[in-house]
Image (cartoon, helix red, strand yellow):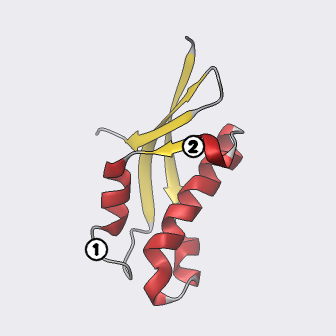
Amino acid sequence: MAEEEIILNIPLRNARKAPRTERAERAMIEIRKYVVSHLKAKEEDVWIDGRVNRLVWSRGIRNSPSIIRVKAVKFEDGLVELSLAEE
């Protein structure tokens, strides 16, 4: 099965436009939207690893990171898997 692997730096500054108590949730939505637009995938085909979720929520609901670095793997059938990029 052929797969495409790419490292993405996802800006999350649009999460700051959301109310304080919804910023981490908005950051997760922004991550999914960025991957859909850059890898030409469907929203329901994007799978986000739990470690990415924990990183976004690590500073609470109000202070999500402003940028996140992830590794995206796109499979032949269109599924996309996101995980943290290992340094």
Callout 1: helix, strand or loop?
loop
Percent of width and height locating residue 33: 64, 56
Discs 2, 1 touching: Cβ within 8 Å: no
Tell me: residue 12, above or below residue 9.
Answer: below
Q: Nearer the viewer, mark 2 or mark 1?
A: 2
Question: Does residue 72 appear left or right of residue 65 in this picture?
Answer: right
Q: Which numbered disc, 2 or 1, marks the residue that appears first in the sequence?
A: 2
- How crowded pointer 1 is (Cα within 10 Å; few <14, some 14-19, many 20+) is rated as few
Q: In the rendered image, which quarter contains the C terminus?
A: top left
Residue drawn at the location 44% of the way across and 68% of the way down: 66
Element type at mark 2: strand
Give the percent coordinates (x, y) of residue 56. 37, 64
In the depicted structure, whether residue 38 falls above or below residue 59: above
Q: Residue at x 42, y 49 (%)?
A: 69
Instruction: Identify residue for label 2.
Output: 46
**What residue type is disc 2 on?**
Val
Q: Amino acid at mark 1?
A: Arg
Pick the front one: 45 or 30: 45
Image x and y of residue 43, in percent: 65, 48
Cα gap from disc 2 to disc 1, whole angstroms: 24 Å
In the rendered structure, the answer to whether residue 63 lies left or right of residue 16 reads left
Task: Give the quadrant of residue 1.
Answer: top right
In percent of the image, x 65 and y 29: which residue is there? 78
Q: Which mark is residue 59?
A: 1
Residue at (37% x, 78% y) in the render: 61
